[in-house]
Image: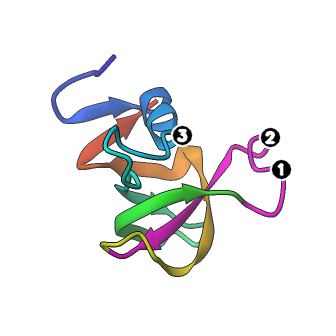
Amino acid sequence: MFVSMDTIKLQVVLADMEVKSNPDGKIKTFSISYVKKDGELVYVLRAIKTGLRFNSYSKMMRGVVAVDKEGGWIGHPTPVHIFKITEYNGFKVSI
């Protein structure tokens, strides 16, 4: 499933993002970095996956929002193209 100790497959990332909570019932968060349309690299230390206002799956987008330690939203949902994800939980993402 993993390519190496420092790399994770995009398919595994997308499956992991779908998990909403940990076995203990707490909200599951992750760290993510991605490249925006204008080329800016964005790093979010603690985030959750959320829905978007449009059909994001057909456009290969996922909604990501930064959260605090308690799981409260910081900011607004941001659409992220799945092929622009560069890092997930400290692992480099490979296709």
Q: Residue at x 28, y 49 (%)?
A: 89
The location of residue 15, given as percent across then percent down, is 50, 32
Name the front one of labels 2 and 3.
3
| Frontmost residue, 72 versus 59 | 72
Work out whether 69 lies above or below 15: below
Gap in angstroms between the C-alphas marked 1 and 2: 6 Å
Is residue 77 within the magenta segment?
A: no
Q: Residue at x 80, y 40 (%)?
A: 58
Work out whether 45 lies above or below 84: below
Circles 1 and 2: CB atoms closer than 8 Å: yes
Rendered-image quadrant of the N terminus: top left
Work out whether 8 lies above or below 48: above
The type of residue carrying mark 1 is: Asn
Question: Which quadrant would residue 41 be assigned to in this image?
Answer: bottom left
The type of residue carrying mark 3 is: Glu
Q: Which residues are magenta?
A: 52-68
Which residue was labeled with disc 1?
55
Gap in angstroms between the C-alphas marked 3 and 1: 16 Å
